[in-house]
Amino acid sequence: MANIEHRGPGNAFGAGASGTPKARIRAIRAALWMIAAILAVRQLADVVRTPKGERLTDLETWIGPDGVLHVNGSLYDADKFTGTPFAGLVLKPFARAAEQALGWGWTFGTLILVAVLGLVAARALPQPVSRRISLLAAPVAICLLMLSLPVRNTLHLGQTSIIPVLLVLLGCFAVRGERASGILIGIGAALQPTVLLFAALFWFTGRRRAAAATGSTFLACTALAWAAMPHDSWAYWVHHLAGAGLGARPDGLANQSLHGALLRFGLEGPLEIGLFVLLSAAVIFLGLRRAVRYAQDGQLLLAVAITGCVAVAVSPTTWQHQLLWVLLAVVGRVGKKQSDRYMWPVAVILVSTLPAKMMLPNMPVVEPIRDNLVLIAALAAATVVPFLSRTAPQYQTPTPTDYAAPVPARWSRVPLMPFWRRVTTRPNLLLELLLIRVGYSAYQQARLAATGGTISGGRATAEQHGEQIYSIEQFLHIDIEHWVNHAVVKVSWLEEFFNFYYTSFHFGVPLTILGVLYVRRPADYRWARSALGFATVLALVGFWLYPLAPPRLMPDLGFIDTVHGVQDFTQPDYGTLTALTNQYAAMPSLHFGWSLWCGLVIAILAPKWWMKALGLLHPLFTVSAIVATGNHWVLDAVGGATVVGAGFGLGYLLAGPRVRKTLKVATGAEPVIDMTKDSAKDRTPS
């Protein structure tokens, strides 16, 4: 298979970014290659730092001193080897190699294969592409591959799953001649049987000779393995139904196939097998039909990715290291609007690089989705995602996003970010929800990592910092926490009110404000959301640099924890939430910071004076609640106010002032007027 269109001359160097000099593109390209090299070194270092008994465990299981390839008898007796008999035949010669040397060679070889895979994938991008994209595609592809969970899992386990994917891409985009293409993909099918689906893709796109070569090569390799290892071949192909059920736990979360999902839903026996066959047939029909259509449209890499996603779904077992096909689906273009264009690639990259628990909250209602998230992404790519055809008008020129008129920078030494233009239209809701969820997961992980992953890891430092804060407050005569805490406890209804306010309004009010702004005032939503994001990131830096014990977790100071109850200070981990989050992330107080953000947004945007006053009551009640319940010091609230102010300030410096009002010309092509109170003549041009 080859691209329908040959690679054209492309746009001028740096096309797509008006006025971008050649030197800037070269610098970006060099930086990306440097990042790719750093990621490769980091992956290698992770393997080296892993204790010997925990790294390359699959490789050790196969070819180690006691590996299954050394043992007389069947490869499949112990359920440790899940590859095809041909794979075992290929690996047997390596079993005689020195274990240590082979481990290093295997790791370096895998990294080289990943680099080659990224280069081939970048070269196979659907045409036409700009000169800038063609130059940057290879390092970006290699970086994404290095970050992906399948590659990291392959390096950690010492697996071979990159080889079939690379053989397919080489056969489709690198070698000349249909017969050579078919031979490479046939070898890949002998290693991973579902790769045979590419023979069907060849056949229905008119590449009959390549399809025949794929099938005949697969049969030849399988026959060779059958002749050399007849007992193993019978066990794999007949007894285990082409590998179905092999592995320690085919119903485990690591098996992201339809078979694994059905087993996790509690189905088994003939009912599960019959349903699996029916669903697989439907996925194969729909997926291959779409793959053929996109191949004929000239999007051959997308067609290959769709076929690979079909293979992921219909394989009896698809382990994490076999899921690279999902990442390749990132090349598909979805959405007619420019603002929607990033939804699909962001979702694919997040699914391929982050654990499922970071994508969806830890709630029972979403467990069926979270447990099968990668499978759902593969099924979506194969059957339902509406990828644009190259003949569609929006393929090259999506409907443009509306921007407010640009404004000069406030200071010449702090130029506005050219990519951070002030958008006036509503963003993609799914993308917003996805980024909010991932951002909150990163927020949780950063809070916990600040103390080394355990509460006890940062206890001494946090208590020392608590003494420092308490001393500063005593010097400033603002150490009112103990008095307020004990005064509130004496009034039961007031204690209950502040406990309820502390536990109930922290997330509800900001999410409500964001929801209202998203629906009613899209431009203000973007402005407010950016300020909140900046403030939260700055707060994470504070948690990391200055772990601080709140008053309720300071021994010998006599504070009463009104929310969580009495704490046992003799235990290293204590409190209701210590298993979930870092209780020493007190400075700055995001409880107060987020409430102050809510109050400021309402005070600035609300049309009525009483609405503004009501909004400002929220931070007042919040600061009272965090002090009364013993969860924060007064200076924590000062820190929260500081990061919120910095969040609004950063948004102003990077993008300019908030869009007050936008007017469009009669054609509706672009917004031309930005009514702000700041006059352009009062600003220093950048």
Image: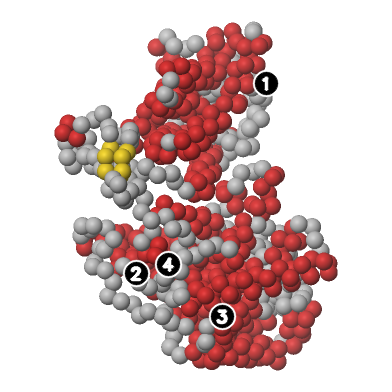
Label 2 to label 3, Cα distance in Å? 25 Å
Res. 392 visible in picture: yes
Residue depth check, mark 3 versus mark 1: number of the one nearer the observer? 3
SS label for mark 1 = loop
Residue annotated with mark 3 = 201
Picture residue at 52% right of the left edge, 14% below the top: 481
Amino acid type shown at disc 3: Leu
SS label for mark 4 = loop
Mark sitting earlier along the chain (4/3): 3
Q: Horizontal and vertical percent for residue 588?
A: 45, 28
Mark sitting earlier along the chain (2/1): 2
Picture residue at 62% right of the left edge, 71% below the top: 286
Label 2 to label 4, Cα distance in Å? 16 Å
Residue annotated with mark 1 = 566
Amino acid type shown at disc 4: Ala
Position of 109 relative to 511 (above/below): below
SS label for mark 3 = helix
Label 4 to label 1, Cα distance in Å? 65 Å
Q: Horizontal and vertical percent for residue 37?
A: 38, 63
Pick the residue in front: 580 or 165: 165
Q: Tell whether label 3 touches label 4 (CB within 8 Å).
A: no
Label 2 to label 1, Cα distance in Å? 64 Å
Picture residue at 43% right of the left edge, 82% below the top: 2
Total labels: the figure holds 4
Residue annotated with mark 2 = 129
Q: Horizontal and vertical percent for residue 260?
A: 71, 63
Picture residue at 77% right of the left edge, 67% below the top: 275
